[in-house]
Image: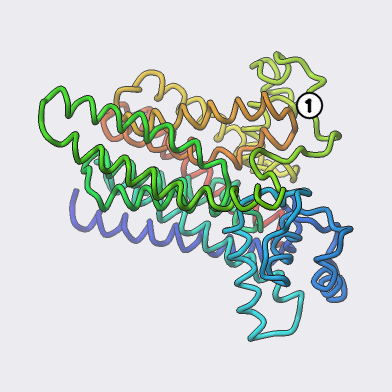
Amino acid sequence: MSDKKNTIYKILIIATILVGLIVRILFINSTSVIECQFDAGVGELKTAEDYENVMADSTVDGFIGRHLDYILQVYKTGKIPDKIIGQYYHPPLGHAIFAGWLKIMDIFTDSAMIKIESMQYISVLYSMLIIFSFIKILNEFDISLRNKLLAIMIVTFIPIGIYMSGTINNDQLVTLFSLLSLLYLIRWKKDQSYKNTILLSLCIGLGLLTKSSIVVMILPCIIVYFITLHKSVYEEDNNWKKLAVEAVILMVIVCALGLPYHIYSLSIGKNTIGISQPPEDRSVAMYSLFDRFGPSNIFKLKEYNLFNSYINSQVGFGLVVSRLISEKIMIILVFVLFIQSLYMMIIYYKDDIVLLTTFVSWWFGFIYLNLSMPYLSSANSRYMIVPILCGLLLIMSRLEKSESKIFNYEMIFTSSMLTICSIVYFMMCFVV
């Protein structure tokens, strides 16, 4: 590829990321901090007085313990909640960062509205860091700049990524740590250095201090570790001794970061192991397993079906339904990418053990969550950003090796249409 083409692709990548940032900023500025949220903790915030009341009453017993309540508790008291209601079972790192941001905003304004709404800019930052982390992972594969551009267009403009940029829960931060864990696991597989071991351990440990769902990343780490260890022992080199030391380092760092919160909580009688039960009106336990997990309901818009919810919540976030044709097109494109990623993982599972084990581990955890917690919120794709991106990585890796013009044109069409439809969708639904 000529230097001129490389330069053009680099410019297009930068332009894609900048447009993605602009769309996210316009989105959060056109929606309040409680719109398109999960468990935000407040009914409505319309006037400045509403925000002042929320800020003043955040520690009263009547609050239901959602994410905004959690943040304001830490902000006002400097302590994590000492009881389990709503979302108070979560580890505190994500909420503490938001609370710290509110403290910084105290320096610049007395307006509760400005302070609370400005927290969305932290989520935008997380959203952009997720994109940059994905680019770092892309760089670990032998993928051309043109195909990198196609992948970056998809990850930048897939609607759930834009919706998540406005949330004030801990999903964004734990997704960031999960992707960074994937990055350093890929690097560790190539180079079993102490540096990569420590960085991998810190990402998982800090993720556990944010949200327990990242525990799923430990499974691919274990599988990749023992494959590497077996190879070292089989080849009769002395690297196995270094690998044993690195296993201890990982275990110590992860436990040192991930366990103290739960140990402290247990010491004060607050059991934070597990997940808080959602309201019973969100339960789907009355439907059969076939209705919930069977393929027959994918296209019937039944939100109690796991796969239907998984696909549709990538576009409407499970909270928004529009009549725009762009939304319908995006649902079709997301479905096509979903089928492609499954096909690639089944046919080319030997291509990359890290992507395969991460993809399977997250899907196993997702299905287990929906079996043990049969609620509408359990089937939302916000829990599945990591395997979505793993599937995309394998698609692009195969595209690089493929000589099929149909596959080539299909990915150009998919990434281009998703970008265009996403921009139209967010401009029409939320900005205009």
The scheme the figure's colours follow is: rainbow
Q: Is residue 150 visible?
A: no
Q: Is residue 206 visible?
A: yes
Please identify the quarter of the rendering in which residue 63 is found: bottom right
Residue 89 position, x and y percent, is 69, 48
Q: Is residue 191 left or right of residue 198?
A: left
Image position of 308 with respect to 34: above or below? above
Please identify the quarter of the rendering in which residue 237 is found: top left
Image position of 315 with respect to 17: above or below? above
Total numbered labels: 1
Q: Amino acid at mark 1?
A: Val
Residue occupying the point 49% across, 35% down: 216
Write down the residue under mark 1. Answer: 284
Residue 154 position, x and y percent, is 47, 45
Disc 1: CA contacts within 10 A as few (<14), some (14-19) or many (>=20): many
State which quarter of the image contains the C terminus: bottom right
Residue occupying the point 68% across, 26% down: 372
Residue occupying the point 22% across, 42% down: 192
Q: Is residue 321 left or right of residue 1?
A: right
Q: Is residue 295 left or right of residue 230?
A: right
Residue 118 position, x and y percent, is 66, 71
Image position of 320 with respect to 76: above or below? above
Residue occupying the point 31% across, 30% down: 352
Between 194 and 191, the one lying in front of the other is: 194
What element does badge 1 sit on?
A: loop
Residue that lies at the very extreme toward the front in this rendered image: 267
